[in-house]
Amino acid sequence: MSGEQREHRSEGESGRSRHRSRARRTEGEFREHGERRPRGAGGGRRRRRGLRRMLLWLVPLLLGAGSLLLIPWWSERGLRTAERQLDAGDAEAALQSVEGYLQTQGTSDAALALKARVLVKLGQAAEALRLIDRVGAASVPEMRAYSEASLMLQRWMSALPVLEHLVKLLPEDADLLHELSACRARLGRYEEAIEAAQRFAKLPRCEARGYTLIGLLERDRGNNQKCAEAWSRVLSIKPEADDLQVSAGEFFLEYGKALMLSGDAGRAEPALERGVSLAESAVALAWLGKAQQQLGRREQSERSWLRAVQLEPLNFMALEGLAELRMQQRDFAGALALLQPVEKESGLTSTTGFLLQRLYGLVDQPEKSAEWKQRTETLRRLEDARVRMEQVIVNSPDTLWAQVFQAWYLAEQNNREQAKVLLYPFVKEDADEFILMLWTSLRDGLPLPGLEYVPMEAF
């Protein structure tokens, strides 16, 4: 190496030595000399070391937090699967998914609530209610399951407040309005039931079904004229009476009956004929015969009644009609022979009793005629009591007696548990004898007190 090269190398090493020395100077020395610390490797290394330290504790923290979120999401995938299956209408598969979750993950309120919803779709209402009573109903689907299960078990009083709350949340839900209307009617609250049915009828594509429901409610509360008006409107929308809550045959039968009870036999006859053609039954034929009789079609009415008796030998209306035709022909013995088979039947009406009274007199059996006169008077009193009870329920649904009579009707329909719930607030030591008799029969499983015990003077 030449002297010039050695000199150049010496100068280079000297410069690098000074640079390292300068880099090692403290921050204080730089401040003391009024110099700025050069932006070099020292500051960058410290920042990188700080970043590495931060990542060392931040990454585990993020992984832990992610795990806390991911584990429940992953473990609940069985419930999400069951929810999708339930929404798709496959309740059997949904039940298997929920049961699998409960076996592997243990019991949880969410799983039990979902199981209850599935059980409702499978028709297992009692078990569904047991689960909902255990975990509660916090969401709209859970409340709907509770109301549906209650309706299945005819627990009208349990379903009513839940349905009313749901309708407030979902005022345009057609199914809820229909269920609310029916539930109110079951408790004798016909005005409120019709109000819900009218709201239902105003929803898109619900007018025909809505007015069918209104007609059914008006029929049940004895307002046949309004029933016929509602169903006339249904036919203006659906002339074939298809896709309604009742079959077309039943619709035309009930429409014809409403017209008959409103005194319009002329319009009733074609409706009843249509009902018979769609679904022949003894009831439809008996009403058709009655319409034909009122219109002076004697031979046609006789044929209709004879056919009704072929289908149902103890059809009271058809037998009465045929007996009256025999009486017109002065065949009193033949008329009596037609009615004698029903003498010991339950459900006998005062009109049949009166015919038997007359016929026994006409065939010169005064003792039997007197017997049937007394029985007819008893039947008429019982019918009057029932009519008065129905009037109280319809016209004054919030009164004590309306609630008592509705409890009696619920029990008559084999819904004694709901009858007990409805009657219980009025059971006191000084309560009316009828109330105490009804409570005793419900509590002890005894026959209901007869309508002869209804305190007619109380209202």
Image (cartoon, helix red, strand yellow):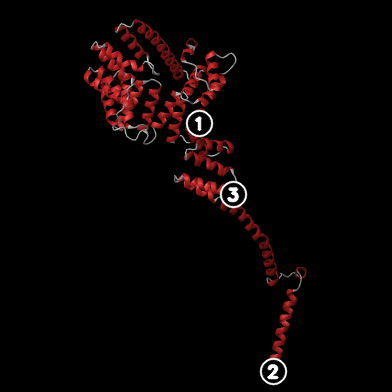
What number is the disc on residue 159? 1
| Residue drawn where x is 54% and y is 13% of the image | 433
- Separation of residues labelled 2 and 3 (CA atoms): 85 Å
Q: Locate residue 367, reporting x and y percent.
A: 36, 6
Q: Please identify, in this view, whether the residue under mark 2 or under mark 3 is nearer the observer.
A: 3
Q: Which element carries disc 1, helix, strand or loop?
A: helix
Q: Which mark is residue 2?
A: 2
Q: Which residue is mark 3?
A: 105
Compared to 228, does 239 lie above or below? below
Earlier sequence position, callout 2 versus callout 3: 2
Q: Earlier in the sequence, mark 1 or mark 3?
A: 3
Mark 2, Cα crowd under 10 Å, few <14 / some 14-19 / many 20+, is few
Asked which secondary structure carries label 2, the reply is loop
Q: Are marks 1 and 2 in contact (CB under 8 Å)?
A: no
Residue at 24% across / 22% down in the picture?
Answer: 303
Give the number of the disc on residue 124.
Answer: none
Count residues near mark 3 (Cα–Cα under 10 Å), then give few for <14, some for 14-19, many for 20+: few
Viewer can see residue 137: no
Q: Amino acid at mark 1?
A: Ala
* Residue appearing at x 28%, y 15% in the figure: 323
Q: Dot 3 lies on which element?
A: helix
Task: Work out whether residue 382 can be spotted.
Answer: yes
* Nearer the observer, 2 or 90: 90
